Image (cartoon, rainbow, N blue to C red):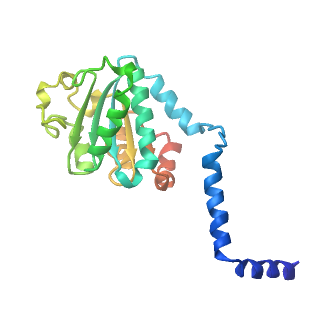
Amino acid sequence: MNRKFNTFLQNLDRLDRRIIFLIIGLVVLIPLLVPLNLPVEPTGLTRDAFEAIHHLPDDATVLISFEYGPSTKPEIHPMAVSVLRHFFSRGYKVVVMCLWPDGLFMAREALDEVLNDERFDDLVYGVDYVNLGYRPGNEAVIKGITKSFAANFTVDSKQTDISEIPLMNNIRTVMDVDFIFSLSAGYPGAIEWVLYASDPLQIPVSSGNASIQVNQLLPYVKSGQM
């Protein structure tokens, strides 16, 4: 058996590389030309996050933080769009902020994509949702908004004074939001939201994160902190 296997490996080693490239090309091309349409089954954790969002009060205010950039956009952007669409379809007030510089551009793109849906034509910026933009400081920003949004975000992403934004009149600190959602590709991200806002203040939090973070976040999920 081992001799046959070794012979097989030797034959593979002598195989013309053009044949190998052809096989790889066919493996990639065929599913594109003939989609398999395999069913996508949500995991238990996905269902839990959906249910937590879906059963918030009808007048809930939610905070969504963008902590990813172009390199992780293919992985996280679809989650950003889905979560924003879920928030808006439920009629929640949405506060957007960014802990990563690139997050500002990711947030704008996700908002533009979602708000292009005619179902959300009636949403008014500054009343139903706001994009506060990016602020440097990592977890210091999270700590800051536990005491005051206005002290950390004096203007929004459009350079409008925060005191002139109706939605922010009733949101003094992060304790005035009902739910936090972190779109996280690393530091600062979901873990910092748990450590400095969600856990000490008992604000429900969930995240859509890069796969590389899963093992870091699972202990917080299993302990009930997320």
Residue 161 percent coordinates (x, y): 11, 31
Q: How many marks?
A: 0
Name above or below for residue 59 compared with residue 112: above
Location of the N terminus (image quadrant) = bottom right
Location of the C terminus (image quadrant) = top left
Name above or below for residue 136 compared with residue 82: below
User: Residue, x 51% and y 48% (percent of image)?
Assistant: 218
User: Residue, x 49% and y 34% (percent of image)?
Assistant: 49
User: Residue, x 42% and y 20% (percent of image)?
Assistant: 90
Residue 141 appears in which quarter of the rendering? top left
Residue 48 in view in this figure: yes
Residue 201 in view in this figure: no
Residue 71 percent coordinates (x, y): 38, 55
Residue 52 percent coordinates (x, y): 48, 29
Q: Is residue 219 left or right of residue 6?
A: left
User: Residue, x 29% and y 38% (percent of image)?
Assistant: 108
Residue 93 percent coordinates (x, y): 31, 23
Residue 172 appears in which quarter of the rendering? top left
Q: Is residue 61 left or right of residue 74?
A: left
